[in-house]
Image (tube, rainbow, N blue to C red):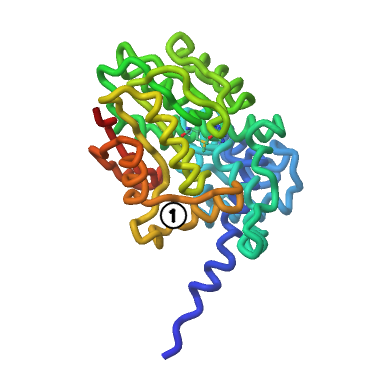
């Protein structure tokens, strides 16, 4: 019997749901609905959108489980939308979700990337060249770290450590969370200049400005000047091919005393590099975004850590929605 083609149709149209979610967040529909149940005409008036298309969008949100329609024809948020899609709520994930909307045009050129091996847009737009995109990107990382990313901070125990280097620390959220839960720990967020500027503002907003500093740092060009007893490299190595990873790990090792701890936290692949699904898709996402984007397996990173003097002591696999694995290793004497 011939296989059922349904999975192909489902895959080919999967972006419809993504586009509906992204449009709703861009138009702040869940925030408008949080003001109270309303007809599509009323929602359109709140959002400043066209009424007939707004009705179609809201119906799509109902089908996706993000809104409900009452018997009286009014729309309201589901608990999922109310918790994560309303501006100002602690769980708000808007900027992190919108980032996927920014990246979507790059995915539509995936075939060109695979044909040529070159990205179709410079990734530097998110890392300083375009001020608004950089800001959205850094705040997106912050919201993600504060929400689903708390699971990462929860498995990192830095008790007794004094000085953390957070390489490619982005918004500084993990450094702030880790200093807040670890007496005596100070942290240095090391990231590109435009990102470090925004991180300083975020860290101050979290009340951690006295224990977290944000330093301009380019891991291609700069070396670490201090001596650290803890290093965190979170969500960074997926931008790099193996030689790039080795070089960053060597810099971390050179600045770490024997007994120092390092945590690598990222989306990681199975050792055969053919799964899991989120990992292989995320690896493609990084390939359309960054010149050297690649996801790595735990086995690969264990061996690269070993080369620069670290022994892996624990591996924590965190489930959806974060999909991160955290490798802990210690610097040998
Ligand atoms: C996905 S973000 C992860 C941020 C943060 N560590 C986290 O887990 O939330 C990757 C970070 O790597 C930084 N980065 C990229 N290239 C860099 C470079 N050459 N030197 C230093 N940081 C870099 C980016 O600016 C960005 O903040």
Indicate yes or no: mark 1 CB to ligand 1 under 8 Å. Answer: no
Residue ID at (61%, 59%): 16
**Which residue is situated farthest in the top direction here?**
210
**Which residue is situated farthest in the bottom direction here?**
1
Relative placement, left or right, of 169 versus 164 is right
19 is higher (above) or lower (below) than 246: below
Residue ID at (56%, 25%): 217
Q: Position of residue 290 (x, y in %)?
A: 59, 46
Between 22 and 80, the residue placed more toward the observer is 22
Q: Position of residue 127 (x, y in %)?
A: 63, 34
Between 77 and 225, the residue placed more toward the observer is 225
49 is higher (above) or lower (below) than 62: above
Residue ID at (68%, 41%): 42
Q: Which residue is mark 1?
A: 278
Q: Position of residue 44 (x, y in %)?
A: 71, 43
Relative placement, left or right, of 259 versus 41 is left
Q: Residues within 10 Å of mark 1 (few under 14, many from 20)?
A: some
Q: Position of residue 248 (x, y in %)?
A: 46, 36
């Amino acid at each position: 019997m011939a296989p059922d083609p349904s999975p192909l149709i489902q895959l080919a149209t999967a972006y419809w749901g993504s586009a509906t979610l992204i449009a709703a967040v861009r138009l702040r529909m869940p925030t408008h609905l949080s003001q109270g149940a309303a007809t599509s005409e009323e929602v359109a008036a709140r959002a400043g959108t066209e009424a007939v298309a707004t009705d179609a969008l809201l119906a799509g949100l109902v089908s996706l489980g993000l809104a409900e329609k009452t018997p009286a024809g009014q729309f309201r948020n589901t608990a999922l939308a109310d918790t994560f899609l309303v501006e100002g709520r602690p769980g708000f994930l808007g900027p992190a979700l919108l980032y996927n909307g920014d990246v979507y045009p790059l995915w539509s050129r995936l075939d060109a990337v695979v044909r040529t091996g070159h990205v179709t847009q410079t990734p530097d737009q998110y890392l300083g060249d375009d001020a608004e995109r950089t800001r959205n990107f850094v705040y997106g990382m912050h919201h993600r770290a504060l929400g689903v990313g708390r699971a990462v901070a929860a498995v990192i125990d830095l008790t007794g450590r004094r000085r953390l280097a957070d390489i490619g620390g982005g918004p500084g959220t993990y450094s702030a969370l880790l200093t807040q839960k670890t007496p005596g720990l100070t942290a240095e967020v090391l990231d590109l200049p435009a990102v470090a500027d925004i991180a300083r503002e975020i860290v101050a907003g979290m009340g951690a400005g006295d224990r977290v500093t944000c330093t301009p740092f380019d891991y291609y060009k700069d070396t670490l000047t201090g001596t650290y007893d803890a290093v965190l490299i979170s969500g960074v190595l997926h931008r790099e091919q193996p030689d790039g990873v080795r070089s960053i790990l060597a810099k971390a090792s050179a600045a770490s005393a024997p007994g120092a701890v390092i945590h690598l936290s990222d989306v990681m692949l199975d050792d055969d590099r053919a799964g899991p699904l989120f990992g292989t898709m995320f690896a493609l996402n990084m390939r359309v975004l960054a010149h050297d984007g690649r996801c790595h397996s735990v086995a690969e990173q264990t061996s690269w850590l070993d080369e620069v003097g670290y022994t892996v002591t624990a591996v924590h696999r965190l489930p959806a929605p974060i999909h991160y694995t955290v490798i802990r290793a210690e610097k040998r004497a």
